[in-house]
Amino acid sequence: MGRVTSPTAPVTETGYPWPIETTRLANGLRVVVSEDRTVPVVCVNLWYDVGSRHEPPGQTGFAHLFEHLMFEGSQHVRKTEHMRLVQGNGGSLNATTNPDRTNYFESMPSEHLELALWLEADRMGGLVPALTQETLDNQREVVKNERRQRYDNVPYGDAWLRLLPLLYPEGHPYHHATIGSMEDLNAAGLDTFKAFHQQYYAPNNCVLTVAGDASPAEVFALAEKYFGAIEEVPGIPTAPAGHLAGPATEPVRETVTAAVPAPRIYLSHRTYPFGTAGYDAVTVLATVLGSGRGSRLYQRLADGKRIAQPDYIGSYGVDLAHGPAPLIITATAKDGVDVETLEDGLAEVVQSLIDEPVTGDELDRAKALLTTSWWRQVSTVGGRADTLGRYTTQFGDPATAGSRLPAWLAVTADDVTEAAVRTLQKESRVTLTYLPETKA
Amino acid sequence: MSLITTRPEAGTARPYAFPAVRRVTAHGGTVIAAHLPGQFLASAVLLLDASAAREPAGREGTATVLAKSLEEGTRKRDSTAYALALEGLGAELSPSVDWDTFRVGVSAPAPRLAGAVRLAAEAARTPKLDPADVERVRDDEVTALRMDWAQPGPRADAALRADLFAADGRYGRPLHGDPASVAAVTVDDVAAFHERWMLRPGVLLVAGDLDGLDLAELAEAAFADTTGQALDLEAPLGLAVPAAPHVILVDRPGSVQSTLRIGHRAPERVTPDYVPMTLAATVLGGAFTSRLNHLIREVKGYTYGIRGSYAMTRRAGRFEVAAGVQTAVTGPAIRDTLGEIRRTQQDGVTEEELAVARSWRAGQLSVEMQTPGAITGALATLVVHELPDDYYETLRREYLEATVEQVSAAAGRHLAVDGLTLVVEGDGAAIRDELAEFGALTEATV
């Protein structure tokens, strides 16, 4: 009971209806396999349990710069050969770093599974001998260009960089952004990176997931063959604790005057860690509040009062698991609307989640959208491998991936109201405002 | 510890096959559906011959304003009721406009797709188009374009397009118009565009597990109450590459990067050289290990990424290199870029490079075509360019069989380093002087 679905909704017992098998090598590497023979494609995905939350002061941006170095060759793979071998055999590859973790993945035509495993094993076990000052210097420049392109040269591009220190206190693992500071990156020395690899890029700090056109037996045997000889690293240091006792108690505000085309506001609150019942309620709440044209923000501010630009309004949670994850709510003023009017409007809609119970229709709509987005996420072998890697790394069991969608669908209107009452009070709000420079 | 020192050999490849395609015809329209067994998500796209190229002069952006007006209510229900009905199925409408088509797409769990298609067709065929709503959507679109044009890129894109297609009317203007042309769009323009182009049956593309989908029901939803015949195709615009390179500066004071858009015209999608051209561009600027990315990013560290490619539509084609480079190295980055284009044009490609390009392009046909959305996109290519159902199998074979001679010859024919337009959007005060060496310099007014 309490589960609200429309009559045509598919029955959802699990969000992960594909098989999952796991094993653990003697060196601690966890191996997860999810077989699906539908297309001749296989994805190899590695989650290393290291992210920017592990970075000490003065070393911000190191985890991410390190991710770049992982593509520059290893003991038996020449510089540039990694990319050439993956793309040159039909594959797509990438890697990402966030506060929680670093992931590496390649989707390949399935006859190249063994190649992908060999490449990954070589850079897990043999990166340090291949790491040179020249490579470090070059990739440092690439990362600085990445920062310019994604954050510094784009209107509002630095919002995330500004929100984090406002949301999380000094010393908290989420206080600084993953991209790091130019100063810290400039100071980065080769030995630090060698030590970083030796410390964190260990089989016992990693989950290897293979999804798609491969059998568990085949993958387990290949994992042993390629990764089995890599030694376990004892005593991997943990990141500083991310626990915070409840929401912030003082509102914080920052106003930036910059080369932006219109006033924009970001409201943000710390909520709950990803994976908890509280965060499931926040996920539904964010969808009710700010996802799609039927959301409260769109209906009341883009439509309704018509004070916000319809293309730039919304809310979303950032799925971080090692501390209370942020909920971000944003709107951009329409021409002629002043920023105070916009902020009042936003605050009123956020307050409505506390004062005005979510209706059955609103809940239905949010759950239907979340259902589609879940199935989209697992519609590729790459999406499935990453999902299983996440749930194994963060919750110790890939099968828990299947419970997320049912957990969203079980959220009640009362759960949403309670999450709003607990997390969206004015006292705990971060307000970041961008104002256009006044033209002379 | 001992790692395995030798690279493993490839296993046995499973044969490649594009998903099985089924067709159903009703009311003059055709459903083209690809079977993806086991997919929970399904996608549908109503494909209409109502592209941006059909917009009247000076009113570029009419189709985009129409696309955004479709959800402002239909003859049956107001905008709020429409949003709740559609999103209650877990679907969101994605209308889009390109140079060949107008597309109205929806994705939803398969059991809900028919309802979503019914609502998509309701919006596409019978939008309310209340004048006050259309005017508001238009004004919002002007604001949204201004927001977009404040980012690096759109102004440079517009300057390049204006230069390459100066003599070709609509093709010389941005796909979605610019703030001024959208501001000039009237309610009557939008209503007339809808009336004239959106009521023919068109094609409904579907991808998903067809065991749970009733194609006749989808056809009925998409094509009931439509009228008119398919339109005749118009001829390609043809080629016009200038004899000398020239430079256009788009000033962006204080910019920490220079945005490069360097290009010239190229054949249209119908060209028999499509495969060797694509492979040549992959070697030059497509793959991560491409000549451009290797030199400009990996060796020099000037950029986060640089790409070179051909874009080919039914009636127009162009070659383009795109990148954002650090302001201080704008000149050296352009010099190196031109050097690689020249080398590729004059000396062609090597077998080692082509081997990567071949396998990558062929492999991408399976690796990047897993989702229902990707498959409807692939079906759209078949329809727009009148290609057969077994096209992707043929394409894969042609990629794998292309020779160094064929690809080098295509590079020689379809790259023109001495006819390039070099658009540079960046801090004029810092870079203006060093641009002169690359050709006659003008400043864009976009």
Image (spheres, rainbow, N blue to C red):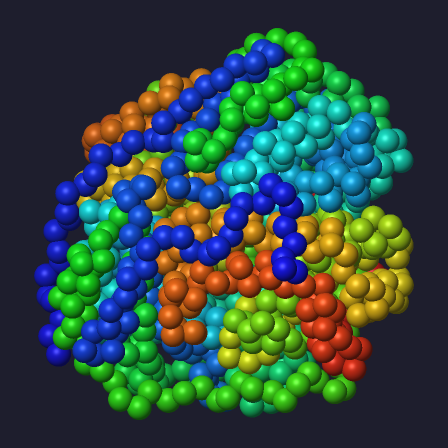
Which residue is situated farthest in the front direction here?
Answer: A1
Q: Nearer the viewer, residue A226 or A182?
A: A226
What residue is rendered at 51% in x and 79% in y? Answer: A322
What residue is rendered at 29% in x and 37% in y? Answer: B362
For this view, does A85 lie left or right of residue B22? left
Q: Is residue A294 visible?
A: yes
Q: Is residue B434 visible?
A: no
Image quarter of residue A45: bottom left
Locate the N terminus of chain B by quadrant: bottom left
What residue is rendered at 56% in x and 51% in y? Answer: A371
Q: Nearer the viewer, residue A108 or B161?
A: A108
Expressed as whole percent of the image width and height from the top left, the position of residue A349 reads: 82, 63
Q: Is residue A393 above or below residue B13?
A: below
What residue is rendered at 78% in x and 66% in y? Answer: A353
Expressed as whole percent of the image width and height from the top left, the position of residue B121 reads: 66, 27
Q: Is residue A164 above or below residue B414?
A: below
For this view, does B181 lie left or right of residue B113? right
For this view, does B106 lie left or right of residue B285? right
Expressed as whole percent of the image width and height from the top left, the position of residue B127 reads: 77, 28
